[in-house]
Image: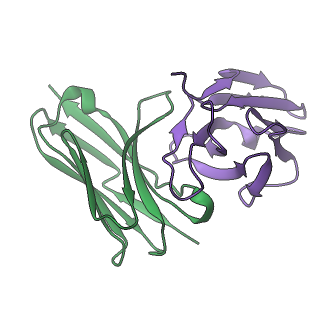
Chain colours: A purple, B green
Amino acid sequence: GAGVSQTPSNKVTEKGKYVELRCDPISGHTALYWYRQSLGQGPEFLIYFQGTGAADDSGLPNDRFFAVRPEGSVSTLKIQRTERGDSAVYLCASSSRVAGVGEQYFGPGTRLTVT
Amino acid sequence: KQEVTQIPAALSVPEGENLVLNCSFTDSAIYNLQWFRQDPGKGLTSLLLIQSSQREQTSGRLNASLDKSSGRSTLYIAASQPGDSATYLCAPWGQGGKLIFGQGTELSVKP
């Protein structure tokens, strides 16, 4: 079956612009996670959805970052007033079970470059 | 705050060697622990998931152990192959299932 997909695969934007990154989880997976990976580092947790609601957004770095999952499937990560420090690979993962039990499956990521 | 350390940061071995990658974490109150591999420019591929009640998991040439009380996990790779070259990431699960990653071990297996 289809895995987790993310679009776009690459995004180049100018400092100060707004961007949206999309994640399509594996069909039927109720949990969805966003992570950010800077060059040479392991991924860092941003936000986690269980169904439509954000169960834990403690990893969002500031209020320029926001994510939604209105129908409990596709999720969009939104970044306002982008800064060069936002440049990273944004990874999405989904899981089929209640948090703490289901294995997470990752998408290929979106590489964001802010110039 | 959970902190994860992976040692060594990089490793280069000849083909056929058995090797051990180490992961330590500061907060032993974890739910599960997952090992991933990441190829350059790619996403993460799950290798093994060790649930909190387990002490090890095996898949083919890979074996991962978990000792929650000491805050350690090891990934053992038997008879390494050039195709095993990648970065290996360890990730204990925090509350809600969020993964806390180390910086990874970059493995190079020379033919």
Q: Nearer the viewer, residue A99 or A18?
A: A99
Q: Is residue A114 left or right of residue B85?
A: right
Q: Nearer the viewer, residue B63 or B104?
A: B63
Q: Is residue A83 left or right of residue A99?
A: right
Q: Is residue B28 left or right of residue A20?
A: left
User: Residue B108 appears at what percent x and percent y?
Assistant: 26, 35
Point 57% across, 31% down: residue:
A107
Point 36% across, 67% down: residue:
B53
- Quadrant the C terminus of chain A occupies: top right
Toward which corner of the image does residue B60 lie, by quadrant?
top left
Farthest bottom residue in view:
B69
User: Residue A90 appears at what percent x and percent y?
Assistant: 65, 37
User: Residue B52 appears at what percent x and percent y?
Assistant: 40, 66
Toward which corner of the image does residue A98 lie, by quadrant?
bottom right
Residue B93 vertical position relative to residue A6 in the rendered view, above or below: below
Q: How many marks?
A: 0
Q: Nearer the viewer, residue A37 or A99?
A: A99
Residue A22 seen: yes
Point 51% across, 60% down: residue:
B93
Toward which corner of the image does residue B74 lie, by quadrant?
bottom left
